[in-house]
Amino acid sequence: MELEIGVNKSTLFNVNPCSKIVSYTHTESPYIVCGLFDIFLGTLSAVTVCGNLLVIIAIIYFKQLHTPTNGLILSLAVVDLLVGALVFPLTMEFSLSSCLYQESLFCKVRSGFDISLSTCSVLHLCCIAVDRYYAVCQPLTYKSKINGGIIGVMVLVSWGGPGVVAIGLVGLNRVKCVHNCFFAIFLGKVLLILITFYLPLIIMLCIYLKIFLVAQKQAHSIQNSTSSGARVTKTERKATRTLAIVMGVFLVCWLPSFLCTTIFSFSNVAQPGVLVEILNWLALSNSMLNPFIYAFFYSWFRSAFRMIITGKIISGDFTDSKLL
């Protein structure tokens, strides 16, 4: 059943849809508001691309950063760079335009990139959580269990999983329903939400909770064997802060969008297009924040970024430089 918008379609596609939406708030200059909105989103896209590009160059250029763990961060940066370079511009072009009112080819392309790359990013975060689990909870066997081959498998799964999801969505969209399609559509939505968000979220929560408990246990063990507890207290605060940033930013960015999708999937109420797009942008912003969380937190990445931004790597060969 086609959703009735309540506006004349010929008028709709002759007027900037952003202006129509903004005009509902009784703004006298909707085009100015839309222009500022485009500038803001364009800035987010540029920051996402530049931030992840810095991560990619740093890991590829400096030999000190050639580690299995950084291989995951490199792959994640590639995903997030594609989100900034492809999903952000497509969303800017179509979020507040025809994609709110019709299912065109461009809208499907945008949705495909959005779902597949965002899912790829989430799966990379899960793999990084697994890597951190072995590094903190099983440090003696970490190098033997997390090697280049295992990292390669993680990267393949993180890229291949979203590809399977995208193919499944294409197949689901091609199915022509004649009678009762509720269960087919409902099941498809539920499986998509479970695979792309809730399952990875549960895995990450369990892993980081385990890491936090082990880190606290290790800190107390160190405190019992030393006369000074200041260093231990600092370690506990640092571990708590790091895990809070990782999970907090992930939840703040992604949870509202998927909660909204879940709630409306279980109801017969049409999803409010503007709210959905705002929450979608909030989720996409996680790709912009990932470089800050997983790279800027480490001092050797900050040193690498300074050398890249200042152009120092152009003046000579610094691939073997010791990054502090």
Image (cartoon, helix red, strand yellow):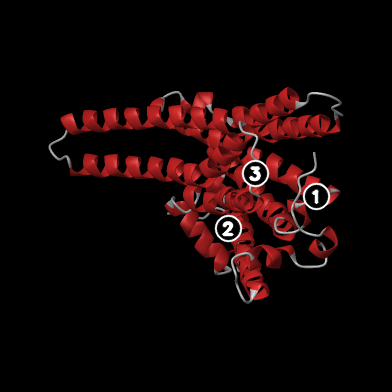
Mark number, residue 259: none
Label 1 environment density (alpha carbons within 10 Å; few <14, some 14–19, many ≥20) = few
Cα separation between marks 1 and 3: 14 Å
Given the image, on which type of amino acid does mark 1 rest?
Gln
Is 34 left, or right, of 204 in this rendering?
A: right
For the question of whether residue 154 can be seen, the reply is no
Q: Circle 3 sits on which residue?
A: 271
Q: Nearer the viewer, residue 222 or 323?
A: 222
Mark number, residue 51: 2
Splitting the image into 4 quarters, where does residue 171 fall? Answer: top right
Is 20 left, or right, of 151 in this rendering?
A: right
Quarter containing the C terminus:
bottom left
Cα separation between marks 2 and 1: 34 Å
Q: Give the answer, above or below, for where 180 lies relative to 106.
A: above
Q: Earlier in the sequence, mark 2 or mark 1?
A: 2
Q: Is mark 3 on a helix, strand or loop?
A: loop
- The x, y position of residue 317, in whole percent, is 60, 60
Judged from this view, the residue extending furthest toward the front is: 6
Is 169 left, or right, of 158 in this rendering?
A: right
- The x, y position of residue 164, in whole percent, is 75, 30
Q: Give the answer, above or below, for where 168 lies relative to 304.
A: above
- The x, y position of residue 58, in whole percent, is 58, 54
For the question of whether residue 51 can be seen, the reply is yes
Q: Which of marks 3 and 2 is nearer the N terminus?
A: 2
- The x, y position of residue 291, in whole percent, is 53, 52
Given the image, on which type of amino acid does mark 2 rest?
Gly
Label 2 environment density (alpha carbons within 10 Å; few <14, some 14–19, many ≥20) = many
Q: Which of 309 and 198 is in front in this view?
A: 198
Given the image, on which type of amino acid does mark 3 rest?
Gln
Q: Circle 1 sits on which residue?
A: 102
